[in-house]
Amino acid sequence: MPAFAANLSFMFNEWDFIDRFAAAADAGFEAVEFLFPYECPPDQIARAVCTNGLEVVFFNLPAGDWARGDRGLAALPDRREEFRHGLREVRPYLEATGARRLHMMSGRAPFHSRRAREAYRSALYEALEQLEPDSVTLLIEPINRRDMPGYFLSDYDFALETILATGSQRVRMTYDFYHRQIIAGDLLPGFQALLPVIDHIQIASAPGRHEPDSEELNSRHIFDKIDLSGYAGFVGCEYRPRHGTVEGLAWIEPYFALRRLARGGLHPSEPATVAMALL
């Protein structure tokens, strides 16, 4: 059965960021992910993680000025010094969270620009070198240009080629079923083909990017295939709740119950049918 991580940049927005850790733990999550932690002091985040017994799956390298439209710096050769500053800025947060994965966002740049491609690959090699002492896995992720117009990395073939060219086990892909559906479709064959380089998975409905229990994707079938694939990591819930985070968690409760059952911790008040619903 999948193990789920709450994305605290999308979910639990009814709480201040630092309070979302407790809210996610109270809701039953064992792990979290988020876009950026940099507005909170590292020691404050460390306490939130430790107090709530959570695993931090990943977060993003600094991505420039988000409010002004930046969506990463890696493919922007004129902003390499800012990118390098981000590599230094991230270290206290790696220590605070215990995270061993970082997502390197490409930024907005023409995909066919030779200069952008060279900058992106150069930034990836530089990040690999600078973060080697931290034993960090660098994640890259194709993101659709409908949600993020002009985003450089939106091609799965280029992403795979880039990963293989590094020759490093520390460069891997996030496979987001929502983005894949919009970019290329062919969800499960694509997943199987890319599985050797996938180190993280994310899920949301498509096209609305809400709870993964409706619209175009058959989430139950997807989760079954993830189980059968042997993937042992977390599935990140990077979706926007329709009406409220807690109110929208009915879809995940059977999975939580199954995990409690597997650990012998199913509460007597929980109907057996809930625990067995997905068997």
Image: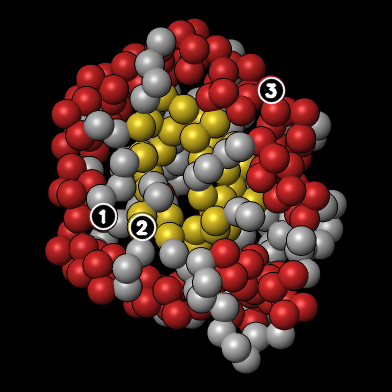
User: Three-letter amino acid code at disc 1?
Assistant: Thr
Residue 248 drawn above or below residue 78: below
Judge from the rendering whether residue 114 lies leftward or rightward of residue 239; answer left or right. Answer: left
- Quadrant in which residue 8 is drawn: bottom left
- Which residue is labeled 3 in the image? 193
Residue 135 x %, y %? 25, 32
Q: Residue furthest front?
A: 264
**Few, some or many residues within 10 Å of mark 1 (<14, 14–19, 20+):** many
Between disc 2 and disc 1, whose residue precedes? 2
Distance between the Cα atoms at labels 2 and 3?
A: 28 Å
Judge from the rendering whether residue 124 lies leftward or rightward of residue 96; answer left or right. Answer: right
Q: Residue at x 70, y 50 (%)?
A: 223
- Which residue is labeled 1 in the image? 97
**Few, some or many residues within 10 Å of mark 3 (<14, 14–19, 20+):** few
User: Three-letter amino acid code at disc 2?
Assistant: Glu
Residue 128 drawn above or below residue 82: above
Residue 72 x %, y %? 41, 37
Distance between the Cα atoms at labels 2 and 1?
A: 8 Å
Q: Say what secondary structure mark 3 lies in.
A: helix
